Amino acid sequence: MRQAAHIYVLATSDKLNRDSQQHWAPIEGPWTLITDADASHAGTRAFAGVVGLTIESVRVAGSAAA
């Protein structure tokens, strides 16, 4: 990950802000979280203020989370 120009993390809304997801690899530099959670979801709000992070919300067909 240190050599990457940019890092993309794909996570569905049910994976965000869960106690069982306690550990993330340290990410240095710019990265993008792509998720079906919208901006009002507690999981995306938990990432507010993370330096270098861009959150992209996408609609997933058949998903109630978007």
Image (cartoon, rainbow, N blue to C red):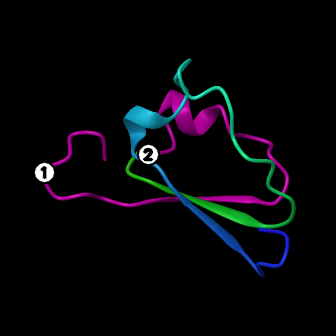
List the residue tagged with mark 2: 38
- Residue 34 rendering spot, x and y as whole percentages: 50, 59
Q: Residue at x 42, y 44 (%)?
A: 37
Q: Which residue is mark 1?
A: 62
Judge left or right: residue 49 versus residue 23. Answer: right
- Residue 29, quarter of picture: bottom right
Chain part drawn in magenta:
38-66
Q: Quadrant of the N terminus?
A: bottom right
- Amino acid type for the residue under numbered disc 1: Gly
On residue 30, which mark appears? none
On the rendered structure, is 49 left or right of 60? right
Q: Secondary structure at mark 2?
A: loop
**Pointer 1 or 2: first along the chain:** 2
Crowd tier of the residue under label 2, counting other residues whose Cα lies within 10 Å: few below 14, some 14–19, many 20 or above:
some
- Splitting the image into 4 quarters, where does residue 19 fall? top right
Asked whether, in this view, residue 34 is left or right of residue 48, the answer is left
Q: Give the residue type that dot 2 points to.
A: Asp
**Which residue is drawn at the image coordinates 41% and 39% (left, top)?**
13
- Between 4 and 44, the residue placed more toward the observer is 4
Is 65 rendered above or below residue 26? Answer: above
